[in-house]
Amino acid sequence: MDYLPFTKPFLDDATIQGVAEVLRSGWLATGPNVAEFESKLSEYLGGRIVKSFTSATGALEVALEVCGIGPGDEVITPAMSFAATPNVIMRVGAKPIFVDVDIVTRNIDLDQVERAITSKTRAIMPVHFAGLAVDCDRLYDIARRHGLRVIEDAAHAIGTSWQGRKIGSFGDIVSFSFHPNKNMTTIEGGALSLADPAEAKKLDRLRFHGIAKDEEGNQDVVVPGGKYNLSDVAARVGIGQLAHLDAFNEKRRLLAEHYLDRWAIEDCLLPATGEGHSWHMFAPLIPFERLNLDRKAFIGKMHEQAIGVGIHYPALHLFSLYRKQGYKEGDFPNAERIGRETVTLPLYPMMTPADVERVCSAAARILKS
Ligand SMILES: *Cc1c(COP(=O)(O)O)cnc(C)c1O
């Protein structure tokens, strides 16, 4: 039996050929392919300014810096996400303020966001979890009323729409990831989408050594910038991926619907569906405690059936780093329940409906025994 990992990227032959050409060209670092990738991504996002990065983690960190967020500032973010989301807030010296997520959508609870705003709050950093958009009308209404920046962690949400508009085609600063596990890849990489040309100029400097050039091309260094520029090799992968993105996401949607159709175990909380969902993951919550089964044992048994299962994600506030900030068990019950019960099942464009059925029957056999 073929092993089904929980995710797997697909690179077509034209892209592999294209990468070989870049490798032979002698121009490996940032060059014409990065320019083309950014321009195509901008076109995909309705003409917004797009800046590519070596990772979404780097992109998010620079986004915070561009907003001038640092020591003494608070940023409100969900208690259930990948560690990169709160870590970057800490890295710029600001304080992540966790709030719980909604158990159905698994997105940040916007009622709790409003209640968490203080005089120190500078920004909201939501996550479009698993590719399902946060309620952007409500999010931006809150931000406007309180004068806050919004940095959207859209690592799961390239191709996601909110009410017919693509995430990243509107809003404040939006960050995408192109890690191989995401809906499209540049091997490692990320991008920011933003609206303000003056901030884009600042971003350029923070992304590359703080170097500023005047009209005559004279160099100056104006800030202690970092080093986050994408390579042309990576960008060529991205150009090839972007051409397939909508088809990839449509395949994901069909496979997710097949899962919802075929999942036959009672008392599981299945992922929420919704218009514009890009189905980055398919992750039911399984009541392991009630079933008297250990999640590790379940994952081990699935592995014996040649099926990979991931965990996305443990509650952030229970990691040592965040417990040291004063967070504790019981603070965010939904994030904690997701942390205990979530399993990420295989979902990627090259899977077939028969693969989905294989996963569903293996899970049913293990959970019912
Ligand atoms: C993957 C991921 C990131 C980080 O992306 P990298 O490109 O690996 O740095 C950030 N936030 C979330 C929610 C992610 O899933």
Image: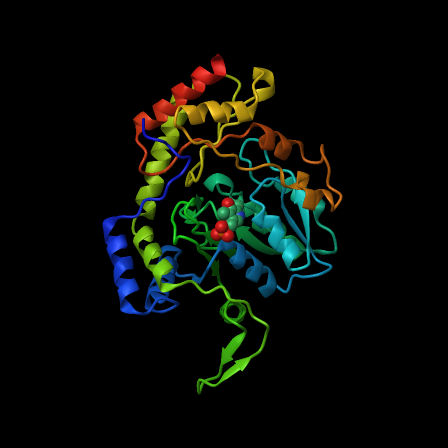
Q: Residue at x 48, y 83 (%)?
A: 214
- Looking at the picture, does residue 341 appear above or below residue 157? above
Q: Is residue 171 visible?
A: no
- Looking at the picture, does residue 215 appear above or below residue 82? below
| Residue 143, position as x, y percentages in the image | 62, 53
Left or right? Give the position of 32 relative to 107: left
Left or right? Give the position of 340 relative to 216: right
Q: Is residue 232 visible?
A: yes
Q: Residue furthest bottom?
A: 216
Q: Residue at x 23, y 53 (%)?
A: 14
Q: How is the image coloured?
A: rainbow
| Residue 304, position as x, y percentages in the image | 42, 24
Q: Residue furthest top?
A: 369
Q: Quadrant of residue 261?
A: top left
Number of on-image labels: 0
- Looking at the picture, does residue 316 appear above or below residue 290? below
Q: Residue at x 44, y 49 (%)?
A: 179
The N terminus, quarter of image = top left
Left or right? Give the position of 95 relative to 19: right
| Residue 230, position as x, y percentages in the image | 42, 62
| Residue 232, position as x, y percentages in the image | 36, 64
Q: Quadrant of residue 41?
A: bottom left
